[in-house]
Image: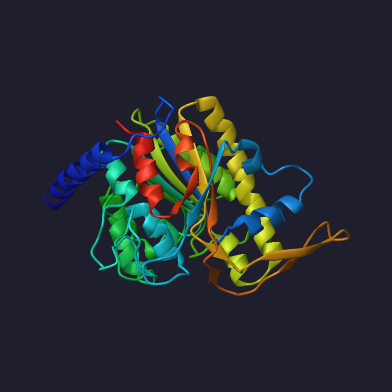
Amino acid sequence: MKRILLASLLISAVNVAFSQAPTVSTSPKKPKNIILLIGDGTGLAQWSAAQASTKDNLQVFNLVEHIGLSKTSSSSNWVTDSGAGATAISIGEKTYNKAIGVRADSTPAFTLSEMLHVKGKGTGLVATCGLTHATPASFYAHQVSRYMDKEIANDFYGGFIDVAIGGGYPWFDSSKLSQTGYQRFVCSKDSLKKIVSPKFIAFYDTSNNVPKQRDGRGDFLLDASMTAIRNLSQNPNGFFLMIEGSQIDWGGHDNDADYVITETLDFDKTIGAIGAWAKENGETLVIITADHETGGLSMPSYDKAAGRPVSKFSTKDHTGIPVPVFSFGPQSELFKGVYENNTLHSKILQAFGE
């Protein structure tokens, strides 16, 4: 009964959101699917460092049709954390640092995943971190602190996410997953590509975190993303999928330029594969942005011998620098301009329309 009531309230809320959304787009075509890619900690400097480290143009630069800027401050701090940054996108409201799916007054708010799920769309999450970490958690959980991993995992059993792939195995109860209708997988080589299921959670391994790309993660992010797309595409109503390149942020916190660059290039490779699929599909809007910038990265010169720029960091934390929003596909023109990060929420709902 509780879940039926929640679904009823969500449907009412979504109908209001759609009916009140302004209609400023000049494109008549609405996307069937939306893929939101969040490069955690990825500002323009991180993209520039990755571009300067490869002979080929970045996939994101080849694919982008429209560019915007997102202002990332939270309700409590000029410099946001990932919880507040991702939650702003997910619920459409600014909130305090460390919040997960709750407003500035700590009350729960409907997430994009919840709103779209009750409208019949498939919903998914992919991350190169644990699925209880701040960014993925902000799309399904409602907790006052990002550090409440057990409580965050408990929120997952609400069943509003159809497909989830990442780390975080120790936090999830197999019996509760089964009771909620999830199949559970632990990945092995090429096993992701073989998953066929409308509702599942897949873990990189039985540890909490996913390895760095340079430590042997390989094409996990790409394979996980395409697996999620393949399974979610079976929904005739379309889907909403959030994909996080999680460890770009971790490289920034470590002031490790190689870590940042290798993770950004891996993220970009995934964008390339998604872009090829989306262009062929023709009904998919792709948005690439960040929750914030990490490290205060600058590149004062170029090291020809190393084949990459000399990188300098001004902090081991986040900064308040606005982050780029790249978009392509139907309704991508909605994401042009300069706006607050929580505006991405209403733009995504507007793009879907009815």
333 lies left or right of 215: left
141 lies left or right of 229: left
x then y, percent, for residue 10:
21, 46
Residue 42, by quadrant, is bottom right
Q: Residue at x 67, y 71 (%)?
A: 313
**Residue nearest the viewer, comparing 137 with 350:** 350
Residue 256, by quadrant, is bottom right
Q: Residue at x 38, y 35 (%)?
A: 24
Residue 13 in sight: yes
x then y, percent, for residue 335:
47, 42
Figure colour scheme: rainbow
Residue at the far right: name it.
305
Residue 198 in sight: no
x then y, percent, for residue 26:
43, 29
**Residue nearest the viewer, comparing 7 with 210:** 7
118 lies left or right of 56: left
Q: Residue at x 39, y 29 (%)?
A: 30
Q: Residue at x 41, y 48 (%)?
A: 344
**Residue nearest the viewer, comparing 254 with 213:** 254
149 lies left or right of 311: left
Residue at the far left: name it.
1
Above-or-below relation of 274 to 81:
above
